[in-house]
Amino acid sequence: MRWTLPKPVFYASAAATVVGVAYLTKDRLGGPKYKGTEDLTNKVVIVTGANSGIGKETTLELAKRNAKVIMACRDMEKCEMVRRNIVLDSKNKYVYCRKCDLASQESIRNFVTQFKKEHDKLHILINNAGVMRCPKSYTKEGIEMQLGVNYMGHFLLTNLLLDVLKVSAPSRIVNLASRTYRKGQINMKDLNFENDYDEGRAYSQSKLAVMLFTHELANRLKDTNVTVNAVYPGIVDTNITRHMFVYRNIITKILLKPIAWPFIKDPMQGAQTVLYAALDPSLAKVSGCYIQDSEIAEVSEDAKDENMAKWLWKVSEKWTKLNVM
């Protein structure tokens, strides 16, 4: 007599197997977990965009290591809600919300002024905040939003904090990058995408700008014991994808997201390489590199273009009025 499972049991078993495989796939593709146990007592850290996604998970992990963490965020109400949970989870009361809207250079300058009144050291700056493939829009200074937030805002913020980073050395700067930088081109004739705006090309341009900024800044920081590296966290399920078509369309969102889930990192997985770049002792003297899955990776020739990096720096100084005080 042939024995077979009852259909309900068979379907339940098959479903459990599929779920199990999905979780194993997600875990394997999620990349290595950062295993460092550094104690960050008395270390001061700034994380931009710290109230959600990778920034939130990074802030939590740094708080668990006893760092003083400043959450530089645009939305103070959301920031405070997240901050309270991080304090409770980490048992670290030295976590602070501070207003910093990267789409406003005035807000960035106000943030830096307040920070310097409250702190005389800065050991880690994590430039995490970003926008992706958003409709054509501009910062308060009239800079295309993706270029303005992803690159220009962090360019200004970092430069205004360099003096504190230098006196706190050894210190580190971590810039969040994307592999789409490889598709990017710096549009020297229309850097601000005034004409023929394309959300994808504008995003790629902003991320190539981050790579060039990392390269040029590393050169300028030689012999200061301040390092700067770019990190690609992988494809991560965060709010930054909200403008993408598959997430705007309810049907594709329902159909595709469960299928894609095992192959997309969650925010905690995305934060691991950020933590590696910010903390790992082996990177103490490493600067100007591109880090993916906790390993240094090769970069394109465009990302190492010295002339373009210097041109972009000059333009950025002008657009941010960096040297006008």
Image (tube, helix red, strand yellow):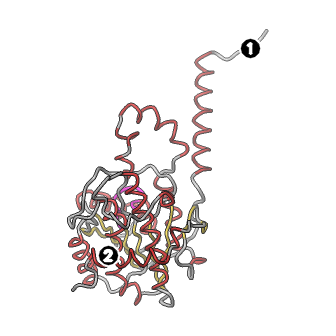
Q: How many marks?
A: 2
Write down the residue under mark 2. 156
Return the disc, 1 or 2, that comes first in the chain's sequence: 1
**In front of the other: 77 or 259:** 259
The residue located at (25%, 55%) in the rendering is 137
Describe the element under mark 2 as helix, strand or loop.
helix
Q: Residues within 10 Å of mark 1 (few under 14, many from 20)?
A: few
Give the quarter of the image for residue 55: bottom left
**In front of the other: 289 or 1:** 289
Indicate whether 38 appears above or below 259: below
Viewport quadrant of the N terminus:
top right
Q: As drawn, which residue projects farthest toward the top? A: 1
Q: Nearer the viewer, mark 1 or mark 2?
A: 2
- Would residue 256 be counted in the magenta stretch? no
Write down the residue under mark 1. 3
Counting from the top left corner in percent of width and height, residue 308 is at 44, 74
In the image: residue 29, left or right of residue 44: right
- Would residue 53 be counted in the magenta stretch? yes
Tell me the amino acid under the disc marked 2: Leu
**In front of the other: 26 or 141:** 141
Specify the segment rendered in magenta.
48-56
In the image: residue 320, left or right of residue 37: left
Tell me the amino acid under the disc marked 1: Trp
Q: Residues within 10 Å of mark 2 (few under 14, many from 20)?
A: many
Q: As drawn, which residue projects farthest toward the right? A: 1
Q: As drawn, which residue projects farthest toward the front? A: 189
The residue located at (58%, 25%) in the rendering is 12
**In front of the other: 247 or 41:** 247
